[in-house]
Image: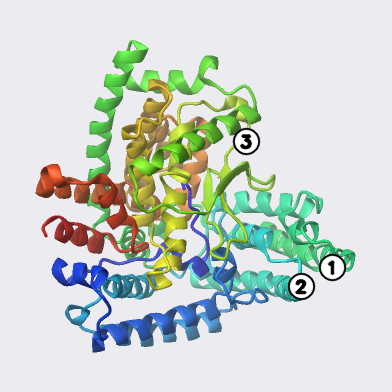
């Protein structure tokens, strides 16, 4: 995501976000957290009611979310209704929720926790409505967040082991063939209306789903429920469901893509080529980053950051590698045999060792820490060729830990250079630190645990890579160079993503820019560019988010001087869940100015 904390379908809230201004001063925020109970204010009650109603409606609309986060007390027996009429009905409900939110005066909210709650809910609504212009439901053929990736993970955490859980598993996954057929119908409508995915992404999905169909039950994620349950009857029933209904439906999807969709899919890769494409891209950048900025501004930020990071890499290059020629150095560390892994297991062990060091160090840098564990493992076979690295959160109910999917495909061709920074990004002090902690924060409204935006989540994970250097977690200058390469990677995303979607860049030009300025190997660079093509705007959130968090920290350090406490700062950043960056920036300024 990178993470990639992969952008799943809309049932993960699609990282949608919009800027929300924090109107209230610090004094009341501080009192509401530290003083004893006080009578609720009218605005506070309305915020709580809105958040309760919205979240409950959302979990009903997208029941997969409850399974993904392990929400207690929820059933796991249905899939979302992905038909277009159901989507339009949900949009009408969103409009009604937004009208309620607009009727609440943010200045009247007294409780600081509820102030964050309001910002999160308002962001989710405004952003979702703004991005309707993209009509993503009509061109959802994606190797990153298609049905086969999102549901292909969900099935591996489907609860089993009791009679009720088995009944729910059968009920949910019996609905998948209809879900797949509805996807096909939506894509047909998209073609009629001028919406389609790019051909190159369609070909990737054909390969992925084709591999999934051909996989044995032992190797398929859809074999997971029966393999995790002890009931012979359930095993027989579920496996019959997969082989007799799910696999044939997936095969229909592949056949449709090959015979009907691919010939009609667009050759262009930029979102500017779909109806209202430029407006969609502007809305997407704001949605993912929570910042109101133009494609041109994002592009220029990327260029400026790349220049600054390149100077840092020159310093390390001169100190430890005898050169200031950054492009040559990057080519050297990603291709010379001395820097490559010898085996798949060595790559996994290297990541695991980095995670172990981080676990030992975090008490010195954080007051709030998650209890949930995180494990790492390679991607399943059907995804490993196109999997860039990915974090999936633990269940709130403790039924499964966090999971870091490691990109170990052709490990012998991968360099060690970026492995540690990736592990810190995905696990601790990055994604796992932030997301698992939010899930455990019972003090906050559940929307702070389940609603996500990329600007905050990915910005934090990228900030964590730099923080890991302050924590002295990197093994050597090779790994520090990898950290800077990772930073350059995110700066390059600002340049490449905007280049593709607003400036007419070709895929090859984007790949060449990535190779010239980052430590990515050719296969990884191509996989990343293909990701940016199918999920426009999301990749810009990392660097934009990190810059906002670093700016907030810099402001706090300047205001507080010797009184600045890094543990307290980190707790203030993490305690509310995934708030909009504008909210976070103002909150930290108020905290530092008290």
Local SS, label 2: helix
Q: What residue is disc 3 on?
A: 409
- Number of the front mark, 3 or 1: 1
Precedes in sequence: disc 3 or disc 2: 2
Counting from the top left corner in percent of width and height, residue 270 is at 41, 53
Above or below for 508 versus 116: above
Q: Are marks 3 and 2 in contact (CB under 8 Å)?
A: no
Residue that label 2 marks: 170
Q: Secondary structure at mark 1?
A: helix
The answer to whether the residues at label 3 and label 1 have Cβ atoms under 8 Å apart is no
The crowding category of the residue bearing disc 2, from other C-alpha atoms within 10 Å (few below 14, some 14 to 19, many at least 20), is some
Q: Picture coordinates of residue 8 (x, y %)?
A: 52, 60
State the separation of the CA atoms marked 3 and 2. 33 Å
* Image: 329 above or below 54: above
| Cα distance between the residues tagged 2 and 1 | 9 Å
Left or right? Give the position of 381 relative to 280: right
**Residues at marks 3 and 1, CA–CA distance in whole angstroms:** 33 Å
The mark lying in front, picked from 2 and 1, is 1
Residue 441 is left or right of residue 344, and the answer is: left
Quickly name the residue at label 1: 234
User: Residue 533, image x and y in percent?
Assistant: 46, 51
Q: Residue furthest front?
A: 36
């Amino acid at each position: 995501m990178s993470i990639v904390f992969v952008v799943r379908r809309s049932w993960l809230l699609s990282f949608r976000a919009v800027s929300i201004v924090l109107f209230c001063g610090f004094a009341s925020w501080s009192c509401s957290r530290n003083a004893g109970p006080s009578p609720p204010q009218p605005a506070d009650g309305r915020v709580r009611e809105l958040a309760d109603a919205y979240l409950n409606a959302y979990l009903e609309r997208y029941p997969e979310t409850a399974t993904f986060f392990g929400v207690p007390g929820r059933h796991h027996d249905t899939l979302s209704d992905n038909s277009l009429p159901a989507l339009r009905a949900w949009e009408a409900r969103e409009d009604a929720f937004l009208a309620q939110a607009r009727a609440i005066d943010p200045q009247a909210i007294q409780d600081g926790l509820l102030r964050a709650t309001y910002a999160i809910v308002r962001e989710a609504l405004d952003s979702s409505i703004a991005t309707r212009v993209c009509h993503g439901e009509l061109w959802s053929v994606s190797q990153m967040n298609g049905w086969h990736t999102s549901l292909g993970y969900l099935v591996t955490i489907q609860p089993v082991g009791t009679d009720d859980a088995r009944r729910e598993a059968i009920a949910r996954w019996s609905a998948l063939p209809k879900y797949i057929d509805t996807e096909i119908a939506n894509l047909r409508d998209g073609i009629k209306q001028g919406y389609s995915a790019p051909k190159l992404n369609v070909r990737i999905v054909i390969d992925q789903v084709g591999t999934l169909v051909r996989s044995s039950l032992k190797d398929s994620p859809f074999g997971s429920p029966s393999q995790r349950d002890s009931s012979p009857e359930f095993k027989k029933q579920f496996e019959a469901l997969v082989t007799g209904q799910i696999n044939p439906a997936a095969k229909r999807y592949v056949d449709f893509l090959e015979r009907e969709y691919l010939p009609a899919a667009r050759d262009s890769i930029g979102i500017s080529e779909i109806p209202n494409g430029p407006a969609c891209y502007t809305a997407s950048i704001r949605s993912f980053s929570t910042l109101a900025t133009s494609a041109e501004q994002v592009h220029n930020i990327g260029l400026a950051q790349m220049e600054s990071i390149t100077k840092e890499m020159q310093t390390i290059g001169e100190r430890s590698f005898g050169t200031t020629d950054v492009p040559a150095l990057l080519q050297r560390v990603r291709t010379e045999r001395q820097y490559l892994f010898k085996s798949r297991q060595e790559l996994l062990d290297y990541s695991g060792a980095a995670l172990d060091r981080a676990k030992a160090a975090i008490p010195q840098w954080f007051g709030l820490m998650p209890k949930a564990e995180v494990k790492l493992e390679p991607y399943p076979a059907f995804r490993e060729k196109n999997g860039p690295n990915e974090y999936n959160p633990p269940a709130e109910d403790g039924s499964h830990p966090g999971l870091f999917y490691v990109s170990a495909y052709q490990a012998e061709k991968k360099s060690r250079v970026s492995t540690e920074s990736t592990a810190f990004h995905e696990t601790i002090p990055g994604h796992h630190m932030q997301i698992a902690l939010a899930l455990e924060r019972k003090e906050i409204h559940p929307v702070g645990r389940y609603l996500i935006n990329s600007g905050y989540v990915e910005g934090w994970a990228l900030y964590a890579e730099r923080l890991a250097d302050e924590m002295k977690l990197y093994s050597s200058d090779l790994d520090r160079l990898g950290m800077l390469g990772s930073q350059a990677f995110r700066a390059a995303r600002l340049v490449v993503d905007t280049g593709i979607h607003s400036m007419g860049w070709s895929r090859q030009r984007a790949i060449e820019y990535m190779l010239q300025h980052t430590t990515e190997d050719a296969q990884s660079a191509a996989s990343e560019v293909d990701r940016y093509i199918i999920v426009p705007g999301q990749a810009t959130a990392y660097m934009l988010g990190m810059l906002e968090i670093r700016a907030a920290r810099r402001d706090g350090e300047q205001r507080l001087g010797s009184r600045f406490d890094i543990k307290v700062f980190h707790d203030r950043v993490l305690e509310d869940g995934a708030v909009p960056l504008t909210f976070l920036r103002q909150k930290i300024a108020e905290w530092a100015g008290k």
